[in-house]
Amino acid sequence: MDDRSLDRLTRFRRDLHRIPELDRDLPKTVKYVKNALSDLRCTVFSPAHSAVCAYFDCGKEDTVAFRSDMDALPVTETSDCDFASAHPGCMHACGHDGHMALVLELAHSVDRLAPDLPHNVLLIFQPAEETTGGARYICESGIFERYRVSHIFGTHLWPALPAGEVVTRSGPMLAKSSEVNVTVTGKSAHIARAWEGRDALLAGMDFLKKAYDMVEREVPPEEPRLLRFGRFVSGTARNALSAETRMMGSLRSFTPETFDFMKRRLLEIASNVEEETGCSVTIDINEGYPPVINDPTLYDRVKAFLGGDMPGVTEPFMIAEDFSFYGLRVPSLFFLLGTGTEEPLHSDKFHFDESVLLSGLRLYERLLYL
C-alpha cells in the first residue's frame, strides 16, 4: 500500500507544484483537485470561491474533517527540478502542494475504508491561507453545522524537524499575528536649518527603540511574544530632514491579554513620541489571524488513542496560520510534519522528498478511527 500511496502522493504533489496560483484565484488548482476526486465515492462541492470539499457519507451521526490549504506564494522559483513552477513569479514555496497531495491521498484511503469508519469524513481544500484567511470563508459557509463536524485536523510541513517526524502539543500551538503599520509625519527643512523642521526619521527611530524596549522590559519573559519591523523607509535627500517615515512590522503573541497590552503600549508610545518630537505618529494594527489553540481534550484523546506514540513540542511556534478559525468552531488539532530540509519555508529553493508525506498519511489514517 505504501508504494501505491507514495506513487500517487508524488504525482499529486509534482503536478500541483507545476501550477501554483495565488490567493483565491486558483482555477487550475481547483480543476486538478476536483478531477483527482472525481472517481471516488464522495460528494464534491465548493462552499466558497476557489474552495473544494469532498464529503464521504459513512452513515454516521457526526463528521471528522481534515483540511489542506491550496494557495502558493509570489516567489520566483530558482530550482532546476523537472517539475518546477510553470507560472513565472509564482511558487509553492510553503508546502501547500504537499498538503494537497496528502489530503488527496487520504481521500483514496477514506474511499477504501468508508464502511468501517466511525465518522463521516469531510476533506477541505481551502484557498487564501497566505493572504486574507480563506478559513474564515469556509467557516462562514455553514458546512460545519450542515455536516455536523465534531472535530478537525490540519498539518503543515516544517523544515526544521527531522524528515517524517510529526509533532503537536496541547494548548497554544501557533501565534496570533497582526500587521503593524506606522507612519510618522514631520516637516522637512534643510539640514543647515534643522530647527525649522521636525525630523520624522529621528522620531521614527525613537519610536522603534521605545517599542522594542517595551517588549523586552514590560512583557514577562515567560510569555512568548514578538514585535519586529522589517521595513523602515524615510526621507528623500541627504541634506533635508525627513518629512515622513513609514514602518512595517508584525506583532505576535499567544494570549489576547499579551496582545492587547502590547497594542495599548504601542499607542501610548506613539503619543509620547508625538509630545517629544512635534511629529505626528499614526499606527494601524490589523486583527490578523487568531492563535492556533489545540483543544486540550482532543489532544488527550488523540494521545491516548495513539498509545502515547505522538512526539510533542514544549514551546509553541511564532508562525501564524488561519487554521485557527476552524478551532473557533469545533475542537481542532494542528500538527507539524518534518521535511528535514535546509531551505526554509518561503524560500525560492524550498523542496522536500515526498516520502515524508507517508508519515502524515499514516497518522491521518489512524485518526479516522478516533
Image: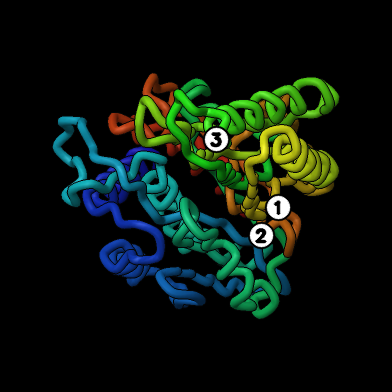
Q: CA distance from mark 3 to mark 1?
A: 58 Å
Q: Which residue occupies the foreground of this view, 356 or 94?
A: 94
User: Quadrant of the rendered structure where residue 139 is?
Assistant: bottom right
Q: Nearer the viewer, mark 2 or mark 1?
A: 2
Q: Is residue 127 above or below residue 105?
A: below
- Residue positioned 84% across, 26% down in the render: 218
Could you tell which of marks 2 and 1 lies nearer the N-terminus? 2
Q: Secondary structure at mark 1?
A: strand
Q: Secondary structure at mark 3?
A: helix
CB atoms of marks 3 and 2 within 8 Å: no
In the rendered image, residue 48, in percent from the top left (x then y), is placed at 49, 75
- Residue positioned 65% across, 50% down in the render: 285
Q: Residues within 10 Å of mark 1 (few under 14, many from 20)?
A: many
- Residue positioned 70% across, 46% down in the render: 291
Q: How is the image coloured?
A: rainbow
In the rendered image, residue 130, in percent from the top left (x then y), is placed at 47, 51
Q: Is residue 253 left or right of residue 77?
A: right
Residue that label 1 marks = 332
In the rendered image, residue 199, in percent from the top left (x then y), is placed at 55, 33
Q: Is residue 185 left or right of residue 348?
A: right
Type of the residue with mark 2: Tyr
Q: Is residue 210 left or right of residue 358?
A: right
Type of the residue with mark 3: Glu
User: Quadrant of the rendered structure where residue 167 is?
Assistant: top right
Q: Nearer the viewer, mark 3 or mark 2?
A: 3
Could you tell which of marks 3 and 1 lies nearer the N-terminus? 3
Residue that label 3 marks = 196
Q: Is residue 162 above or below residue 127?
A: above
Residue that label 2 marks = 326
Type of the residue with mark 1: Ser
